[in-house]
Amino acid sequence: MADDPFAGSILKIKRAYRHMQELDECVKTFLKSDFCLIQVDEDPVTGHHVLRFSVTKTIPDDIPLAIGDTIHNLRSALDILICSILTFAGGNIASSNFPMHETRENLADALEKGEIKRVRPDLVGFILDTIKPYKSGNFGIWALNKLDILDKHRLVIPVFAVTRLSGISARDDNNNTYTNLTVTVGPAGNINLIRTGARMHITNYGQPAIAIMFDKGHPFEGEPVIPTLHKLAKLTTELIEAFRAVAT
């Protein structure tokens, strides 16, 4: 590992995948428990159906901890990457980390004044124009950094929501019956039942499909947590490989 400036970063990414596996197992266990209350209300005027969903149990601590550990390992992989490259070039890593900034202008200014410019000036343009670690350039990497900062101050606690009901049974006012329906549930809980021209009445609510998502105020607000973390791991891996191609 001492001869490979990228080995430490790869180890961090592997560790991140282990935390994601732990997260997946924790979520599956929680979803199998009696953790929520689901009620479907029918509007007596419009006949529309609205799902009321609430989590009745405390989310296990291991879920936000595994999310935070995944995020931190991916972010650390990038810091280790830059510090390793600088070390191999004889640079000073005392105050060096992977450059992340709000704007391209901020990034350009930091690179111009930093250690990367002094010992690996050939990487300045690559970082600025190819990697683009700023909000409007490479949102995923920028958001990873924001999540890591957030997790240092408070736990990244996700939210749960019903996205689909499967196995629904219903009848309409014309006495038509419908069985084994699968319907989607909108953000406000609106159930998208088929339209028959007559008012529908749900007789069996079926089984809910539960999504675990980033809460409001997070960079990936409303996005599914586990798929997003996998995308960030893939993005981080691709970034490291891009550096390998130009920095060795």
Image (tube, rainbow, N blue to C red):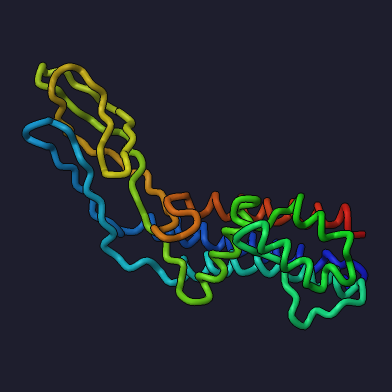
Can you see residue 230? Answer: no
Q: Quadrant of residue 55?
A: bottom left
Q: Is residue 212 above or below residue 120?
A: above
Left or right, 205 with reference to 128 = left
Q: Is residue 133 above or below residue 197?
A: below
Residue at x 62%, y 58% (from the top left corner) = 103
Camera-nearest residue between 232 and 39: 232
Residue 24 image point, x, y percent: 52, 57
Can you see residue 169? Answer: yes
Camera-nearest residue between 181 and 143: 143
Left or right, 212 with reference to 115 = left
Q: Residue furthest bottom?
A: 94
Residue at x 48%, y 77% (from the top left corner) = 153
Q: Is residue 101 above or below residue 40?
A: below
The N terminus sits in image quarter: bottom right
Residue 128 image point, x, y percent: 75, 56
Q: Is residue 44 above or below residue 137?
A: above
Residue at x 82%, y 73% (from the top left corner) = 115
The C terminus sits in image quarter: bottom right
Residue 209 image point, x, y percent: 37, 44
